[in-house]
Image (cartoon, rainbow, N blue to C red):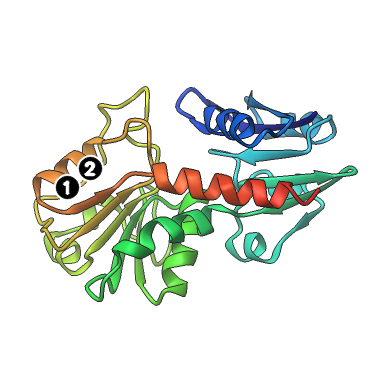
Amino acid sequence: MKKFGLIGKKLGHSYSKSFFEHYFVEKGIDATYDNLEIAEIDEVEAILNGDYHGINVTLPYKEQIIPYLDELDKVAEEIGSVNVVKIDHGKCTGYNSDAYGFQQMIKPFLTNKHEKAIVFGTGGASKSINYVLEHLGIEVLSVSRTPKAGQFSYDQLNDLMIQSCKLIVNTTPVGMFPRMDEELPVDLSALTPDHLVVDLIYNPRETKLLQKANLAGAITLNGESMLREQALKAWEIWDHL
C-alpha cells in the first residue's frame, strides 16, 4: 500500500484528504492519504525521509519546502512554488500543479475583456496564478498588505483600477474556514457584471468576497474546481512511480 499526504500548518479547511480517499476507492487504488500538520517547515524532513510516496503542500509552506527537495521540475522552478512532491527511492522532486489547476478552471470563463487582473496576495499561491495569467498575456497588478517594489497596498486601490481590471483573483486565506467573517480591506463597489471574480478558497464555497461580487452581478468562481484539477494532476505525477 502506498502512502500519500498533505503538509500544512492548519488543515481543518482542506478537502484534499476526502477527495483522495474517495478517488482511491472509486479507482480501486491501494493507497492512503493523511493530513500532516506541522508547526514549522523543518518538521518536513522526517516526513520526506519516511515511508511516503508523495505529498501535497499547502500554505504556508509552498515556498519554504523548496530547500528540502532534491530537484524541481521546470514549471515549479519557474514559478518558485511547490504543491506536489514525488518521493522515489529517497529522491524528492517538487512540482507545481496549482498553475495547471488554475488554468483549467479559469479558461472557459476568460473573454477579451480580461486584459488586466488584480491579484490579492503575494505568497506561494499567487506565484502560480501570476505565472498562468502572464502566460495568457494578462497584465497583473499585485496587491499585498506589505507591498514590495512594483506592488500595490490595499489602500492604494481605487475605483478606476477596479474598473480597468475585469479579472480579480484572491489568493490569500482571508475568509477561509473557520474565520469566515474576515474580509479583505478593499472597497469593491466598482465591480460590474463584466467582472470575473475568483477566490481560491473553497471552504466556505462562498466567501464574503464572492458574496459581494455576486451582488454586483459579476461572474464568480471559488477554488473547488481548481482543487480537483490540481489534485488529478498530482496523482498523474505520483502514478508514474
Instruction: State the image coordinates of residue 40 (x, y, percent, origin top left).
Output: 65, 29
| Left or right of residue 171: residue 87 | right
Residue drawn at x 70%, y 52% as measured from the top left: 237
* Amino acid type assigned to the residue bearing label 2 in the image: Leu
- Residue at figure coordinates x 62%, y 29% from the top left: 25
**Residue 155 relative to residue 127: left or right:** left
Q: Which mark is residue 210?
A: 2
Query: Do labels 2 and 1 touch, CB within 8 Å?
Result: yes
Location of residue 70 with respect to 201 vertically, above or below: below
Measuring from the top left, give residue 110's x and y in whole percent.
30, 67
Q: Disc 1 designates what residue?
A: 213
Give the secondary structure at mark 1.
helix
Left or right, residue 214 beside residue 226: left
The mark total stands at 2
**If the image is split into quadrants, where does the N terminus sit?**
top right
User: Residue at point 17% right, 47% down?
Assistant: 213
**CA separation in Å, label 2 and label 1:** 5 Å
Seen from the viewer's position, the closer of residues 55 and 46 is: 55
Q: Residues within 10 Å of mark 1 (few under 14, many from 20)?
A: many
Q: Is residue 85 above or below residue 18?
A: below
Q: Tell me which corner region of the image, top left, top right, bottom left or bottom right, holds residue 208.
A: top left
Closer to the camera in the image, 235 or 169: 235
Whole-percent x, y for residue 24 in the image: 64, 33
Quarter-wise, where is residue 179 in the image?
top left
Left of 212 or right of it: where is 227? right
In this view, the residue farthest toward the right is 89
